[in-house]
Amino acid sequence: MKYRYPLIFLVGFLLLWEAVVYINTFPDWLLPAPSDVAAVLPEMLPILLEHGQYTLLAAVVGFLLAIVTALILAVLMDVFPVLRQGIYPLVVVSQTIPIISVAPLFIIWFGYGLLPKIVVVVLVCFFPVVVSVTQGMEAAEQDMVNLLRVMGASTWQIIKEVRLPAALPSFFAGLKIAGTYSIMGAVIGEWLGSSKGLGVFMTRAMHSYQFERLFSAIFVVSLLSVLLFLAIELTGRLVMPWHYKKEE
């Protein structure tokens, strides 16, 4: 079983957590035991699903926009080396700016609706996708590129037939990272200002010291991230089955 060791470690961690809380008799408001979180989860599930739909919508829309933007920019940088020399370093430097420090500006500019959360998700997800695609296109076999050039292929044909297919493994690796970041980005946007969403639920639970509800929301956030990761993994297996057969 592929995931047996992660499951064993997860179960062991939960048992250790339960034992620590029981032995030290921590109050529920300070550190609830996993059993307390499991007990309150069914009661909170309808509310969490309602908030989770809003968070998932912002995450998925922002994620898709980030993919489209990253692909367009990566192709343009491959076609125009000067553009890459000017923009790529700026893309890297942009990651030194904490998203949480600029996210309040999006609230001021775009209000408390869905748009600022989508913008945060795009900024969070954009970097790993554009870097993975750019590096993947660079890794294309130069002999194949030279052969197509000798045969009179255009730049777009070379990108379509050689560079983009070569970038697929890197692309999906970047998607897995960006996909898990997307849920986190949506939650960060909701922390800073929103009327609904898992981030809002978590903030309210924290301010009221209902930490078992806070941990139940964390569980749902983690679950959504894992499901999105698995969806990307499945898509990758469908798009490039040869790559996974080679790994196996």
Image (cartoon, helix red, strand yellow):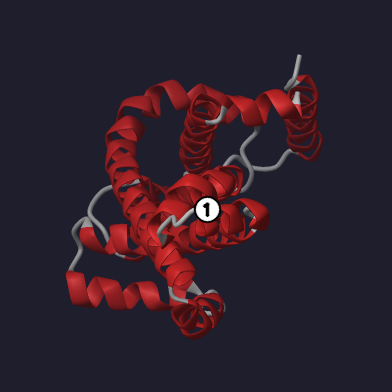
Q: How many marks?
A: 1
Amino acid on which the number 1 mark rests in the picture? Leu
Residue at point 39% right, 53% down? 67
Residue at point 77% right, 19% down? 4
Q: Nearer the viewer, residue 155 or 184?
A: 155
Name the quadrant of the C terminus: top right
Location of mark 1 (residue): 148
Element under label 1? helix
Residue 45 relative to residue 37: left or right: left
Q: Nearer the viewer, residue 198 or 162?
A: 162
Name the quadrant of the N terminus: top right
Q: Nearer the viewer, residue 13 or 57?
A: 57
Query: Which quarter of the picture shows residue 190?
Result: bottom left
Q: Position of residue 21 (x, y in %)?
A: 74, 37
Q: Is residue 29 visible?
A: no
Q: Position of residue 222 (x, y in %)?
A: 53, 38
Residue 207 relative to residue 233: left or right: left
